[in-house]
Image (tube, rainbow, N blue to C red):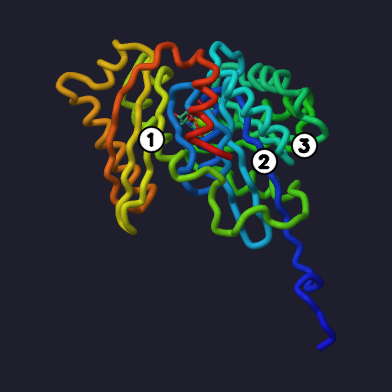
Amino acid sequence: MDGSTDQNIGVTTKAGFVIVFGKPNAGKSTLMNALLNFNLSIVNRKVQTTRNRISGILTEDNFQIVFIDTPGVLSPKYELHKFMLSEIASSFDEADILLMIVDAAVRNPFEDVKYVYEAYEKNFGDKKKILALNKADIAGRDVLMPLSARLFEAFGFDEIVPVSALKKENIDRLKEVIVKFLPEGHFFYDEETLTDKPEKFFAAEILREKILSLYHDEIPYSVMVSIQEFAERSDKLVYINAEIIVERESQKAVIIGKGGESLKKTGAYARKSLEHFLGKKVFLELFVKVRKGWRNNKNFVKDSMIRNSPS
Ligand SMILES: Nc1nc2c(ncn2[C@@H]2O[C@H](COP(=O)(O)OP(=O)(O)OP(=O)(O)O)[C@@H](O)[C@H]2O)c(=O)[nH]1
Ligand SMILES: [Mg+2]
């Protein structure tokens, strides 16, 4: 043999980070999940579902895309929102490619693009910019064609792709466009890695997802889930001890419900999803605590958000 090594066999790999950003409820998390073909990031029809930057890693033969799902908060009202904004800013710094997503089924999607574009323009640098026109299943082709022509003319997007994240329409096309812009380089993670966040983080998110869908009014926004213990008791069993932290005594009473019924229901739903996600039996213990006005407590927000999700 003449000494040919792995390096000069000549398979070129591509790898890079793609930030998914846009207004609350645009479908950022749904889109990342569709691209990954896995429900990693929680989705809800209420706004401000996502609070942290969450990476989802897609590895195929010769490329690796690290998607970063971000919160959709734009004007901060609480310390919690400031934390969410800092998560967006750091995600822009990391990104190689920018993927803006807008709900194309709203009354004036052009205005929404303009709003988001102007809000984040300072973070763009000279990175490639892709716009996904989401919710194409309800927006309709007659709206999307002229809309993308106008958007191309008005803004500096490199590509505009209509998609339906929910129905998984045109997702492969979007993936092709991303791969086209992906820089050449080695993979950042093992081929099997799906995310950089620990299981414990997703345990908290799954519990929060159930609270988002089972409770109303201010409750979903006033809840923080903090995992106190996450212990693999055996190959088949995980013990999870979680605190549901609210801002007021009255909210605690609502979470628990009459005779503990509401909390029991929340726990049962969460346990089922957790077992599905972890592929193990879950023993779940829940406690409800009050931490007055925690959303405006900078240290509490920082400590708890980081404790749940080191990255
Ligand atoms: N019809 C339709 N609904 C969609 C589509 N994509 C997302 N949705 C819905 O829009 C709502 C918001 O979706 P999310 O993925 O949570 O939106 P997000 O941008 O991550 O929201 P935040 O995390 O709150 O900023 C959910 O009810 C989704 O089911 C789509 O392509 N078509
Ligand atoms: Mg989200």
Q: Residues within 10 Å of mark 3 (few under 14, many from 20)?
A: few
- Judge from the rendering whether residue 177 lies leftward or rightward of residue 237; answer left or right: right
Of residues 55 and 246, which is closer to you in this image? Answer: 246
Contact (Cβ within 8 Å) of mark 3 with mark 2: no
Of residues 131 and 188, which is closer to you in this image? Answer: 188
Of residues 231 and 274, which is closer to you in this image? Answer: 231
Q: CB at mark 1 closer than 8 A to ligand 2? A: no
Q: Nearer the viewer, mark 1 or mark 3?
A: 1
Q: Nearer the viewer, mark 3 or mark 2?
A: 2
The disc, 1 or 2, on the residue closer to the chain's N-terminal end is: 2
Residue tagged 2: 18
Q: Amino acid at mark 1?
A: Gln
Q: Is the residue 93 above or below the residue 276 in the image?
A: above
Residue 130 falls in image quadrant: top right
**Residue at position x 21%, y 20% in the image:** 257
Locate the C terminus and report the quarter of the image it occupies: top right
Residue 276 in the image: state x and y as whole percent.
34, 48
Q: Amino acid at mark 2?
A: Val
**Residue at position x 17%, y 19% in the image:** 258
The disc, 1 or 3, on the residue closer to the chain's N-terminal end is: 3
- What distance separates the C-alpha of mark 1 from that of mark 3? 45 Å
Residue 200 in the image: state x and y as whole percent.
43, 41
**Residue at position x 77%, y 23% in the image:** 122
Q: How many marks?
A: 3
Q: Amino acid at mark 3?
A: Asp
Locate the N terminus and report the quarter of the image it occupies: bottom right
**Residue at position x 40%, y 39% in the image:** 203
Rendered image: mark on residue 228: 1
Residue 216 in the image: state x and y as whole percent.
34, 17
- What distance separates the C-alpha of mark 1 from that of mark 2? 32 Å
Residue tagged 3: 158
